[in-house]
Amino acid sequence: MNWSGFYAGIDLGGLSAKTPTTIPALPITADIEPSGFIAGGHLGYRWHTPGSRWVFGVEADFWGVRAADDAEFVGFGNSTRVDMKWGGSLRGVAGRAINSTLLYVTGGVAYANFDGCVLSLLGGCWQSYSDTRLGWTAGLGLAHAFRPNLIARLEYLYSDYGDQSYATPAVVGGVTNVEIRTHVLRGGLSWRFATR
């Protein structure tokens, strides 16, 4: 099996996020954990080093998800909500081929879009904010070529988008901080645009 060539495909799986939200002026935190079904696509290129088992490449992916959760600020009464929307990454890939199977690690930059709001005691959105965050991602995967052009894979990615502050004038102190970290486990199916 020669792994070299361009490839493209689809991904399906699950996303689990940890998005602790803090009002620094009080200070109080709500532990929010959105999770949901994820679907997307990927496009990449692999280069199989001649005469060896090493395979290197670069890949871009994009995903969409419906993952929302809310939690109460402990001791404050009000709650807050985070809704993950979409995202993706641009990553390098390095792996070792064993005939038709490829074990690999991957890492690079990631981005994710979300909506957030502080909820009133009656449940309505009191202060809203949204953002597309940039961060880093790393993971590992297993790919198997059922045919030279048809490749299935299972992949895990961890992404960290850091901690960001948002202006929320109606909230005590006028600022709300949101930290975002995600875990993605997904399966994929790719078509390799090469015959050798």
Image (cartoon, helix red, strand yellow):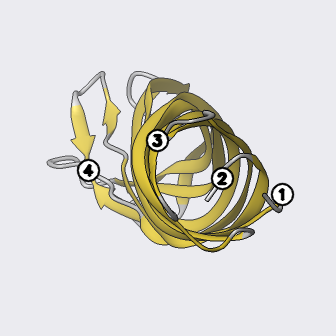
Residue 160 lies in what quarter of the image? top left
- Which residue corresponds to mark 3? 95
In the displayed structure, would residue 150 be above or below residue 166?
A: below
- Which residue corresponds to mark 1? 194
Answer with mark 2 or mark 4, whichever residue precedes in sequence.
Answer: 2
Q: Which amino acid lies under the numbered mark 1 shown in the image of this protein?
A: Ala
Mark 4 nearby-residue class (10 Å; few <14, some 14–19, many ≥20): some
Secondary element at image label 2? loop
In percent of width and height, residue 126 lies at 54, 51
- Which residue corresponds to mark 4? 31
Kindly give the residue lying farthest to the left in the view shown: 75
Q: Nearer the viewer, residue 51 or 3?
A: 51
Q: Which amino acid lies under the numbered mark 2 shown in the image of this protein?
A: Asn
Q: Nearer the viewer, residue 8 or 110?
A: 8
In percent of width and height, residue 138 lies at 42, 37
Mark 1 nearby-residue class (10 Å; few <14, some 14–19, many ≥20): few
Q: Are marks 1 and 2 in contact (CB under 8 Å)?
A: yes
Q: Which mark is residue 2?
A: 2
Kindly give the residue lying farthest to the front in the view shown: 51
Q: CA distance from mark 1 to mark 3?
A: 19 Å
Q: Is residue 38 visible?
A: no
Residue 15 lies in what quarter of the image? bottom left
Mark 2 nearby-residue class (10 Å; few <14, some 14–19, many ≥20): some
In percent of width and height, residue 38 lies at 56, 69
